[in-house]
Amino acid sequence: MFGYIKHLLFCLCRWYRNDNRIILHKQNGKIIECLRYSGLTVSFKGKNSIVEIFEPIKFERRLLANRSKIKISGDNNYICINSTNRSIHNLQVRGMCSNNKLIIGKNFYGMCSIDFCWLDNMVMRIGDDCMFGQDIKFMLGDHHSIYNLATKECINIPRKGIDIGNHVWIARNVRIMKNVTIPCNSVVGAESVVTKEFKEQNCVIAGNPAKIVKTNISWDYANTK
């Protein structure tokens, strides 16, 4: 009887939330649907969107205001946050219209703000084993249009999303703009503004606008001694 009532309540909640779902993958292999997750606030305004979370995972709050938040305004969006033995601080996802996708790989550590800029059909991927410093901001678009005066053609339409490879360290106060790819095993220096696609792995990218300043490197979580 209790199981039937629980199932009925979830069906009513899904109807009330327009088939928006938070799906939790437990460590024991069990998959459950939940209404919320500790340390994370998810708000839906559209319909048919999914936030999928894989344990173990911890959304840590260092300050009362630093709660991770996901705001989905459109329809048919998908967010996947994979398991990590490290903590996630103050993850902010906003500006999602419709048919967008965000994938955060395994063993992610750090904090960041991701702005989909009210665009549709955008994809952002963060690879496995990535570490982000404080105040990292991703912008998948520009929020406003820039036109060619002669042709009236919009010249700042995003061509693609943002792709962060595996084992990437992004230092504090970095800005990652639209159409950017950061290759695997790379480091992005503090205060950098990245505005283009990079293909060479094992490099240090830094500056404004960012460029490759060092090659043939790797990095580790261990502090220097």
Image (cartoon, rainbow, N blue to C red):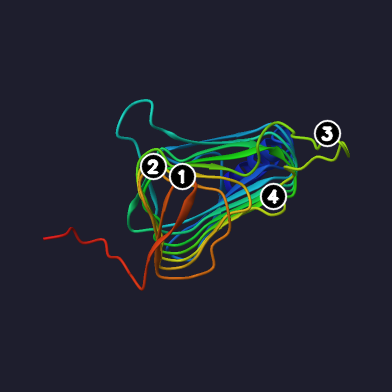
The quadrant of the image that shows the C terminus is bottom left
Choose the circle earlier in sequence order: 3 or 2: 3
Residue contact between numbered discs 3 and 1, judged by CB atoms under 8 Å:
no
From the viewer's side, name the closer residue of 152 and 184: 152
- For the view shown, which residue lies furthest in the left direction? 225
The residue singled out by tag 2 in the image is 191
Q: Is residue 191 left or right of residue 20?
A: left
Observer-side mark, 3 or 1, equals: 3
Disc assigned to residue 208: 1
Q: Position of residue 72 (x, y in %)?
A: 64, 37
Q: Amino acid at mark 2?
A: Glu
Amino acid type indicated by mark 4:
Met
The circle drawn on residue 149 is 3
Q: Residue at x 40, y 68 (%)?
A: 185
Mark 1 and mark 4 in contact? Answer it, CB < 8 Å: no
Q: Residue furthest bottom?
A: 216
Mark 4 burial class by Cα count in 10 Å: few <14, some 14-19, many 20+: many
Distance between the alpha carbons at the discs numbered 1 and 4:
25 Å
Mark 4 and mark 2 lie on one chain; the one further toward the N terminus is 4
Kindly tell me whether residue 184 is visible in this rendering: yes
Placement of 154 over or under 79, stated as above or below: above
Which secondary structure, mark 3? loop
